[in-house]
Amino acid sequence: MAGSDLQRISRLGRYLGRDRRRLLLTLVLLIPVALAGAIQPLLVGQAISILRTVSGATNEAVAPILQPLDSTLALRLIIGALLISVLVRLALQGVQSFNIQSVGQRLTARIRRDLFAHAMDLSLRFHDRMPVGKLLTRLTSDVDALAEVFGSGAVGVLGDLVTLTVIAVTMLLIEWRLGLLLLVSQVPVTLVVLWLQGRYRKANYRVREELSQLNADFQENLQGLDVVQMFRREAFNGARFQRTGLAYREAVNGTILFDSSISAFLEWVSLGAVAIVLALGGWMVSSGAMGLGILTTFILYSQRLFDPLRQMAERFTQIQGGLTAVERIGELLEEPLEIRDHTRAATANTQESTPEGLPAPVQVMPSARGEVVFEGVHFAYRPDEPILQDLSFRLAPGEHVALVGPTGSGKTTVIRLLCRLYEPQQGRILLDGRDIRSLSLPDLRRQLGVVLQDTFLFSGSVGDNLRLDREIDDKQLKEVCRDLGLSSLLGRLPQGLDTELRERGGNLSSGERQLLAVARVAIRNPNVLVMDEATAFMDPSTEATLQRDLDRLLERRTAVVIAHRLATVEAADRILVLRRGRLIEQGTHLQLRAQGGLYAELAELQERGLARL
């Protein structure tokens, strides 16, 4: 096993700490289970030896404890002991199985919880390049495969090793020549099985990659189903999905090949070992060197000797699949957090040094005025495609600023950086004089209220989507909604605030979803309001109704508005004009029109209905 596998397993092994007692009990039970299984061939052999002695055979080895007893009594004792050993073994295996499955499910729940939390903490940059379907595969099937490694796989292998050890010692004590012959045959068998397992693991990694791609394609087509149907892409996308499915099937066939090769190889070797025992043991019985009871014992042992090997091969198949899952899960857990809450880290460890170039962490902003400053900010989603270049500007407390520019000029990126969804490669962003990286993420985002053009609503009730992280009862929430002019909207809904929303708010119109987005920001009373064309999908009457509340929401707050309508831009205190990530103009509407630059061109085109700002 590679060193990286051991490191990842040891890291994931901490999840088993709460189940130490269950695991210890399971490991302790391995020995009596193995002894109960190993004694059964001995008892059968002793029964045959007693019967042979009764018939006059003289070369049978009967246990000293049974020699003084009558043959009938001895056979009854053997049958009773055999029955007890079977019952004890079944009972102990039942306890083991329950404990193993219980630990496996606990392990699965803990790892999946941490994976989800880590995925939520990863920056948008990571999620931009990671398809949702592939991420879901790691959170579901990979975690389930990992549970088998720490459950039935690893514990089962330990049980098989204990069983092999007990059988090996017993065989050597009974007849060392036959025992040594069978044990020596295990060396090449083990080497071949390990080689096949290595090939299986590589094939299994490909299976999980192809399964991730399959899930990603399926999820993408479901999300874009309306586009698929409108543009009649069913046949084309179906053919592409079929190619992905064929690749997955070929990968699975590769694992089946190696898995079946292991099973067939062990079956042939076990049959060969039994044949050798029969040939050599039969000659020893004929020559009087060994009794028939001992030969019967060795035949049963030779069969049982390969049962643990066969089970170990099957479990190693599970383990190899689990190690693939460990690798993939480890890659996700080891994915570095680009957006780190340095304040929280400093609180957890007061001796941890502050990251280079950052001011000392603070827990709470001493004053919240709403001043926003960008100082020499450089940002790129990809190294060869800069989005913002040396961007600097200052928003005074309470100032309303509109961002204007052609598509791709970096307007939305400014919002994402201010909300710290991405980190700039150079420069810094200040909120009330403090670098936003020194603020705790909850405190930073508590100061910001963001209304995006593409509104996302969770499945659940309308009230839950308005509350989100705020603790507010229904009575207060209804009062706030009434003050915001949502009474008509809530009146149209079947159950008002308790109306259940479908996925992404599918049972509401785009304008209604945007109305709720504005409301849930207003409930939080932020100091800085960020709006990306918040009324883009509203009809004129709804927009007029909301405009009064928007004006009140903007009052005494710093506002950054990405605007595409001339009326919204004209109302701003100042307009920042971006092009290719650079600030090229700034001023009021009248000042910029008088300059005759890019803004004047865009405004004139919009007045003619030929462009958007």
Image: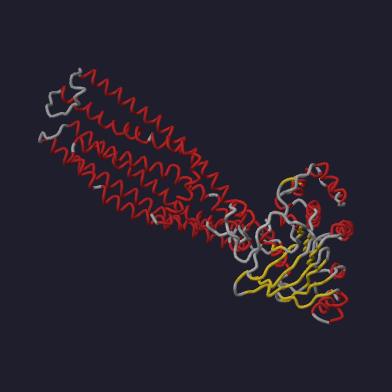
In the picture as drawn, the residue positioned furthest to the left comes out as: 287
Residue drawn at (33%, 42%) of the image? 161
Is 182 placed left or right of 498 in the picture?
A: left
For the C terminus, give its image quadrant.
bottom right
Viewer-proximal residue, 263 or 482?
A: 482
Viewer-proximal residue, 60 or 111?
A: 111
Residue 138 x %, y %: 54, 53
Viewer-proximal residue, 124 or 338?
A: 338
Residue 561 x %, y %: 79, 65
Asked if residue 491 is positioned above or below residue 224 in the image, the reply reads: above
Residue drawn at (12%, 35%) of the image? 289
Q: How is the image coloured?
A: secondary structure
Is 33 placed left or right of 239 in the picture?
A: left
Asked if residue 491 is positioned above or below residue 545 in the image, the reply reads: above
For the N terminus, give its image quadrant.
bottom left
Viewer-proximal residue, 105 or 313?
A: 105
In the picture as drawn, the residue positioned furthest to the front comes out as: 351
Is 307 placed left or right of 569 in the picture?
A: left
Asked if residue 173 is positioned above or below residue 362 in the image, the reply reads: above
The quadrant in which residue 361 appears is: bottom right
In the picture as drawn, the residue positioned furthest to the bottom comes out as: 596
The quadrant in which residue 434 appears is: bottom right
The quadrant in which residue 134 appears is: bottom right
Residue 299 x %, y %: 23, 37
Residue 67 x %, y %: 18, 22
Number of numbered callouts drawn: 0
